[in-house]
């Protein structure tokens, strides 16, 4: 049975300075005292902070509790992630004081506060991805398997990289791009000629790769990339796999393929095996989840609401509850307006 989250009020406050941690038996006790027996009580402090940054702090506490309960196996990973973020930041500053000054500029009063933020962000992402994965339908999976899961393919390519430098004018860059495209078009024309003359396209392609390709790792092997699939090499080559999937064995691309590396023409040498549906299931869920979140950010709000409802979230303080309602409605409307 899920535990209900109820915010009862301030029960303990951490004070800086001499390291004292006052335990308050009720909200009328002092957080700060002055002469003449004047003071700021816990209740007064609570009323003040809840109307400034109280809701943000409360939501962090809520999500931390829920996601640690829901995903206990991810707690250690989240802590390691947050620590790595802090270690990376520390390496950029000469002293702890400089790091703290940087964090305070963005509203984090301590290094620990930012580390906690990074930790909660990690746990939120875990929860959001789990929610989206759990709501992927069998229909979506089957369609993805048919249209986006490719067999392994043996591919060769010829890469032409535009001779562009940072100090070039825009017109010079455009001219360099056009020269590279023209080279690719000439290569395709050579392949078209060889095809018309019933020549061995694989041999012709290998010869052209040795002559023209600027991929030093493959040109001497006729541009051979070996048997690859999505994710086998860096993401630029994923575009080559997608293009090859549209070709029959022995066919070459007749349109310029553009990646961040430059311009390509490819030859599909052979088609291998396609993973079974069951073997591809986990990677399909990962891909569909990534695609859904990039296309529809409102799913993040849906996920957070789902888990808070699951744990029967009840904010007892009516003012904070009202703030929370306005905050969530604003989030929902923001994403609706983006559609």
Image (cartoon, grey):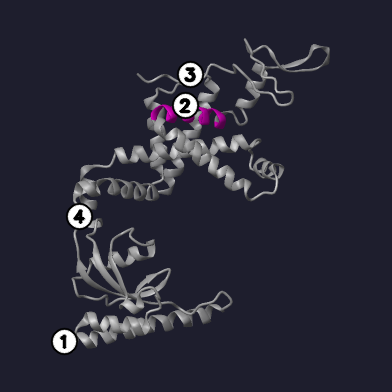
Q: Circle 2 is placed at which residue position?
A: 65
Relative side of 266 to 138, left or right:
right
Magenta stretch: give its range: 56-70
**Distance between mark 4 and mark 3 Cα atoms:** 48 Å
Query: In terms of depth relative to the viewer, which is nearer, 321 or 117?
Result: 117
Tell me the distance, in whole angstroms, between the alpha carbons under discs 1 and 4.
34 Å
Q: Quadrant of residue 34?
A: top right
In the image, residue 247 above or below residue 278: below
SS for callout 3: loop
Task: Provide the secondary structure element on which disc 1 rests.
Answer: loop
From this view, report whether residue 113 is shown above or below residue 184: above
Residue at point 24%, 59% (across, down): 150
Q: Answer with mark 2 or mark 1, whichever residue precedes in sequence.
A: 2
The x and y percentages for residue 136 are 27, 42
User: Mark 1 = which residue?
Assistant: 198
Q: Secondary structure at mark 4?
A: helix
In front of the other: label 2 or label 1?
1
Label 4 crowd (10 A; few <14 / some 14-19 / many >=20) = few
Cβ atoms at labels 2 and 1 below 8 Å apart: no
Which disc number belongs to residue 146? Answer: 4
Residue, disc 3? 6
Lower sequence index among marks 1 and 4: 4
Q: Residues within 10 Å of mark 1 (few under 14, many from 20)?
A: few
Closest to the camera, between mark 3 and mark 2, is 2
Image x and y of residue 258, in percent: 37, 71
Q: CA distance from mark 2 to mark 1?
A: 70 Å
The answer to whether marks 3 and 1 mark residues whose Cβ atoms lie closer than 8 Å is no
Question: CA separation, marks 4 and 2?
Answer: 40 Å
């Amino acid at each position: 049975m899920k535990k209900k989250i109820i915010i009862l009020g301030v029960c303990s406050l951490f004070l800086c300075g001499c390291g004292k941690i006052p335990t308050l038996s009720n909200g009328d006790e002092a957080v700060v005292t002055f002469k003449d027996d004047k003071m700021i009580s816990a209740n007064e402090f609570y009323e003040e902070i809840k109307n400034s940054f109280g809701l943000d702090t409360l939501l962090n506490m809520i999500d931390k509790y829920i996601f640690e309960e829901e995903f206990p196996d991810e707690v250690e990973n989240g802590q390691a992630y947050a620590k790595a973020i802090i270690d990376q930041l520390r390496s950029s500053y000469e002293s702890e004081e400089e790091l703290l000054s940087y964090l305070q500029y963005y509203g984090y009063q301590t290094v620990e506060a930012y580390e906690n933020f990074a930790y909660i962000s990690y746990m939120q992402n875990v929860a959001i991805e789990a929610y989206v994965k759990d709501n992927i339908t069998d229909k979506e999976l089957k369609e993805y398997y048919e249209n986006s899961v490719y067999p392994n393919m043996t591919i060769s390519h010829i890469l032409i990289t535009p001779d562009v430098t940072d100090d070039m004018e825009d017109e010079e860059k455009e001219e360099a791009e056009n020269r590279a495209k023209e080279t690719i078009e000439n290569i395709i024309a050579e392949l078209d000629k060889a095809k018309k003359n019933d020549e061995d396209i694989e041999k012709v392609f290998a010869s052209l790769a040795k002559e023209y390709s600027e991929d030093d790792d493959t040109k001497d092997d006729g541009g051979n990339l070996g048997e690859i699939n999505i994710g086998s090499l860096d993401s630029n080559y994923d575009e080559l796999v997608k293009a090859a999937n549209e070709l029959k064995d022995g066919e070459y691309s007749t349109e310029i393929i553009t990646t961040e590396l430059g311009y390509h023409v490819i030859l599909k040498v052979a088609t291998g095996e396609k993973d079974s549906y069951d073997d591809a299931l986990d990677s399909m869920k990962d891909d569909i989840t990534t695609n859904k979140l990039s296309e529809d950010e409102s799913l993040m709000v849906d996920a957070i609401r789902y888990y808070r409802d699951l744990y029967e979230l009840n904010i007892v303080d009516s003012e904070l509850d009202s703030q929370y309602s306005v905050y969530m409605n604003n989030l929902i409307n923001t994403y609706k307006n983006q559609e």
